[in-house]
Amino acid sequence: MDELGLNKLFAGILMAGLLLMVGIKLADVLVPHSELEQNAYVIEVPEGGTAVAAAPADTGPEPILALLAGADAVAGEKLAKKCTACHVFDAGGANKVGPALWNIVNAQKGAVGGFSYSSALSEFGGEWDYVALNAFLAKPKAYIKGTKMNFAGLKKPTDRANMIAYLRQQADSAVALPTDAEIAAEAGS
Ligand code: HEC
C-alpha cells in the first residue's frame, strides 16, 4: 500500500471513531438517563426491620416443658410400644438394639454401661434433660446427625410430652418437673 493509501486508511479509522463519539453524545441528548426515583422493583421492608427477619427463624421442635405437668404417662407407656423393639424401659433392663432406658431423664448422653454407641451420640455431650429429649424424640437424626437410632420421630408435641412423662417415671426417683422460669425460658428461646 502506498503512502496515500495509508493516509486514507487512517482518515477512515479517525472518521469512524469521530462518528461513534458523536453518536454516543447524540444518544445521550436524545435519551437522557435520569436517576430512578424508586427501585423498579419495590422490595417491602417493614419499618425498622430487615427483610430477612420475615423468614421463620426456628425449624426446631415445638416447646415441650409447658406440656409436661399435664402429660399422660399412661399414654406414654402405650407409645413406648414404638420403642420396645429396641429398648427396655424397666429397672435392670438389658441393652438390646438400643441402650436400656431406666433412669434416662437427666442422665449423661451416651453413657449406659455396656452399650456400644455411635460416635455421633457418644461424642455429642450434655445430658438428656427434657429439652434435649424433646428435640431428639421429635427427629432423632436431625438432632444427632449420624445417630444409629433408626426411628423417624414422634411428630406430635403431646405424644412427645406423654412419652417423656413415661420416661420420667421409669427411674429410681422421678426428676422434678420444669419450673415456671424454665418453661418461660424455653418458650422465649
Ligand atoms: C430401631 C431401633 C430403635 C427404636 C425403634 C428406638 N430407638 Fe432409641 N435408640 C436406638 C439406638 C440404636 C440408640 C443408640 C444410638 C446411637 O448410638 O447413635 C438409641 C438411643 C436412644 C436414646 C439415647 C440413650 C443414651 O443413652 O444416650 C434415647 C433417649 C432413646 N433412644 C429413646 C427412644 C425412644 C423413647 C423411642 C421410642 C419413641 C426409641 N428410642 C425408639 C434404637 C432405637
Image (cartoon, rainbow, N blue to C red):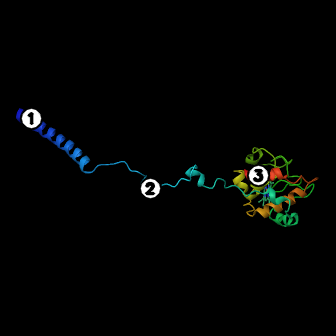
For this view, does 140 lie left or right of residue 175? Answer: left
Residue 67: give x, y in percent of width and height: 81, 60
For the residues labelled 1 and 2, the Cα–Cα distance comes to 53 Å
Q: Is residue 18 above or below residue 146?
A: above
Label 2 lies in ligand 1 vicinity (Cβ under 8 Å): no
Question: Is residue 153 left or right of 51 when viewed as pictured?
Answer: right
Residue labelled with disc 1: 7
Q: Amino acid at mark 3?
A: Glu
Most foreground residue, 26 or 167 = 26
Q: Which residue is mark 3?
A: 186
Q: Which of the marked residues, 1 or 2, is nearer the chain's N terminus?
A: 1
Q: Earlier in the sequence, mark 3 or mark 2?
A: 2
Residue 129 picture location, percent across and down: 82, 50
* Kind of element beneath mark 2: loop
Measure the C-alpha gap from mark 3 to mark 1.
Answer: 85 Å
In which quadrant is the N terminus drawn?
top left
Give the percent coordinates (x, y) of residue 174.
91, 54
Q: Nearer the viewer, residue 178 or 166?
A: 178
